[in-house]
Image: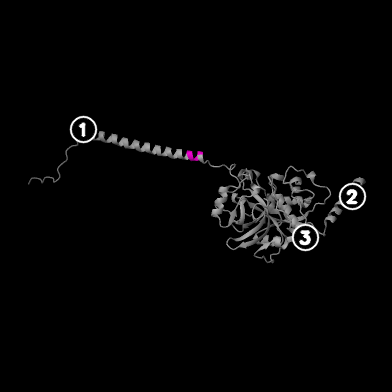
Amino acid sequence: MAEKASSTAPTSAPDSKKITEAMKKRKPKKEKNTWKQYAYWIGATGALIGAAVLVMIISPERTISQIPVNDDQLINHINSRSNAFKAEASSYFKDWTLAHVKNLGGISITAGAQRVPVCAVSSDIKVPTEFDARNKWSACFEGKEVYEGGNCTSSWATSAASVVTNRFCIADPVNLKDLVLSPQVLLSCDQGNRGCDGGDLDTVWDFITQQGLVTETCMPWKASGELGCESKCANEVPLKIASHCLVHGEEGIMREILVNGPVVAPVFVHDDFLVYRSGVYRTLPTASRITDRNRMMVIHAIKLIGWGVDRSQGPYWLVENSWGSSWGEHGFAKIARGKESILIDNLVMAATPAYQAVQSDDDIDSRAAEESFDDLDDDEGK
């Protein structure tokens, strides 16, 4: 039998001439499409770049030297986003930019702060839910104005002098209710610190222990690093502290304030804190940390005078600042407590007045006169 023929007929050999002609027809079409795509991509990219450049020309990104502290955009942003606190421009920061705050820098804390003894306050003292030193010792706060730090890194001086003033008054509210000790003494006379260039939260107490502070009458507050120590009057005996101590933890701070009076506390500064007006301050997620020229976070000292609990915002610290009465709640503020707080609660400082007997202003003048005569006798005896 003859073999069965294949059911599939063999294909004929491809015609090379037809293939070449087909390729010629396809190639130009392919190249044309590719270049069109490239041209379209380049054109679109160029348009985007041009648009971006145009936006930058019309609305350039502001540098820190151009952004005012009282920035309307920031204030409006805070007031539209925050249900905890309100923002508003303050006259203290009029004409200031964030660069001014950055270049001014902040206070510092030395390694020796950890060696400061811990304040000894009984843990048996019951801490109330709310407390305001201004209510408990009203005579020691009446008539006292909130400091204005000026164009000067002075919070280390104003907070320390103000706390010592309060604590002397608390020791004798009858005779020392009008006492106001001068922070200018620290700016002008404390050679261990840096005047308007800043000071150490922990070493400022060494000067007050050894040299003491005179009153505002003797050396008025000028917020100036140019005022020399010789401008201090010579007819007043400086008041000194006997010691200072470190307060640890929220309850420790509360007990110290409750028993002995206000304390000094450091806080980290953010741009939204600068425009705080009222409510419980809690740093917004969009807030910018203020850093100094060494890119370290700026630390500012405040006076801690109490605490409380807001119905919707929770627990807070009550503080007195040194940015004038136009800032915050007439110079005061509520700062959220806990993990979200800007307050550094393990570096809070307190001082004990070296005050044994009740002294009136006449007593102080009398002591000054006696010491002057003693000095004259010593000189004559030499």
User: Which residue carries the number 2 mark?
Assistant: 373
Q: Amino acid at mark 1?
A: Lys
- Which mark lies nearer to you, 3 or 1? 3
The spot of residue 55 in percent (x, y) is 49, 40
- Label 2: state its secondary structure: helix
Q: Residue at x 51, y 38 (%)?
A: 57
User: Which residue carries the number 3 mark?
Assistant: 171
* Image marks 1 and 2: residues in contact by CB distance under 8 Å: no
Range of the magenta residues? Answer: 53-57
- On residue 342, the disc is none
The spot of residue 54 in percent (x, y) is 48, 39
Residue farthest right in this picture = 381
Left or right of residue 61, residue 363 in this image: right
Left or right of residue 228, residue 320 in this image: left
Give the Cα separation between the discs numbered 3 and 1.
114 Å
Q: Main secondary structure of the magenta part?
A: helix
- Label 1: state its secondary structure: helix
Labels 1 and 2: the sequence-earlier one = 1
- Residue 55 on the magenta span: yes
Q: Amino acid at mark 3?
A: Ala
- On residue 17, the disc is 1
Q: Amino acid at mark 2?
A: Phe
The spot of residue 260 in percent (x, y) is 73, 61
Structural crowding at the residue carrying mark 1, measured as other residues with C-alpha within 10 Å and reported as few (<14), some (14–19) or many (≥20): few
Q: Is residue 185 above or below residue 124?
A: above
| One can see residue 335 in this view | yes
Q: Quadrant of the C terminus?
A: top right
